[in-house]
Amino acid sequence: MALVSPVPTTAFDKPLPWPFRYKGLNLGVLTFMVTIVWRVLTVSHMTLVIGAMEVGLFALLMVWVVWRLVQRWMADDWAINGFEIYVLLMVILPLGSAFGAQKEFGQPILWGIIAFKDYYLLLGVLTVYHWLRMGWVTLKQLEKAMLIMSWICLVYFYLATLFINPAPYQDTPLAGANDVKGGGVYYRFNMAAMYFGAIYYSARAFKRETWFDLFYAMLFAAYVVVFRLDRTSMAVTAIGMAGVVLFHVPLKRIVRALMVVILPAIFAVVLIFLLAPSKVKQYEDMFIDAIHTVMGSSGGETEVSVRTLEIAIADRQVAKHPWLGNGRISHTWNETGYEQWLGFFYPADVGMLGLTFIYGYPGMIFLYLLFGVAGIYMLRVKGRNDDLFFITCQFLLLALFLDSLTNGQLTQNPGQALLLLGVMHYYSRINSVADPKAELPSASALA
């Protein structure tokens, strides 16, 4: 069965440039771009290789930006749309934080900017958006590229978890352990690709009544629940999967699926309660611990006290620098990072508060504005209820928003949500096309 529906044939005004004229190469380039911009493999056993790829891509993106500026200067064309303005404002956002880091930690401005070097991969989103506008890639190709990326992550995550002992990597960005999550060492892989796979295949199973797709959806969701052991990730995966079905599938079809899908699932859950009560108790303790953390109370667990300490540090620093934030510390300038001044502290651990710590209140609000703007674009799109990619992106945006409230979604990987914003903007641009299947107008129509 094909991963996605066939790509409609489209006439172009001009021949496609290399490498976009070759389908396989085109898809490979697009998959590479999305994988690096989304940073789904940055925390992995291939960190050094991926890091080198990020640096190389950043250099290419800077060359591309300069070339685009030259092209626009020669054509005397400086018109930009709302999405492009938002991306450009995001790119300059770290400048204020660099001043904040100089004020608080004495870090030179240049090092404060360099500390955000991964952040500037956001230019890759602008590149993909440009390719869509020019008709060099299609939404179906982007959909397929994101599915390939998700399957690559799924296979690697399962293989690594099952066959590579995470213990040697404990207390690094790659792996950790705590008593609340069973005491064992687990990998801290990024879950955005898992969200996409779980939501996409849930939607496809119910929209097309291809129930084997639910097996694929469960493969993605199972990794989050059984191996990743992150409570927010579990919750947003469940919300995304349920939401895309409840809002985009007729009620009669859902009811008809009860006997086929949901009742066996309930039976499986009951079996787990009966056969593995210790595992159920572990998950119960995990979520109780999360409630203690949110309420600021002490449940006697190490993670609660550590997270509470980090929240206190962030609160103190936000109060000192509410407008510019505290920025990032370049490990090249100071290899200990924040530790020299703040002790154990990672902004990604405290979600929205960590974002405010880095950028200040204006920067935090500006970044969260991304989800509101995406919602406006969604409302402009009509007649796409059967478009799997569109409805998946809707609920993936919701999942990323919820994830960002307590995790480092926007502090570490803003490109994930920004790419989806670009997709929503592009859908809104082509909304006036008479035939919804004709997803790609000619380049001249969108220029």
Image: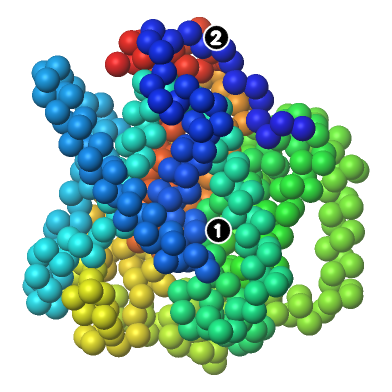
Q: Secondary structure at mark 2?
A: loop
Report the side of 434 relative to 107 (left or right).
Answer: right
* Closest to the observer, 287 or 104: 104
Residue 421 lies, in percent from the top left, at 40, 38
Vertical arrangement, residue 273 with respect to residue 191, above or below: below
Residue beneath disc 2:
435
In this orientation, does residue 362 appear?
A: no
Q: Amino acid at mark 2?
A: Asp
User: Which residue lies most toward the bottom here?
Assistant: 300
Residue displayed at 66% across by 25% down = 5
Vertical arrangement, residue 38 with respect to residue 142, above or below: below
* Label 1 – label 2 distance at C-alpha: 35 Å
In this orientation, does residue 434 appear?
A: yes
Determine which quarter of the picture holds residue 185.
Answer: bottom right
Residue displayed at 45% across by 88% down = 305
Residue displayed at 26% across by 58% down = 117
Residue 112 lies, in percent from the top left, at 16, 66
Q: Amino acid at mark 1?
A: Met
Numbered label attached to residue 405: none
- Indicate the quadrant containing the C terminus: top left, top right, bottom left or bottom right: top left
Residue beneath disc 1:
191
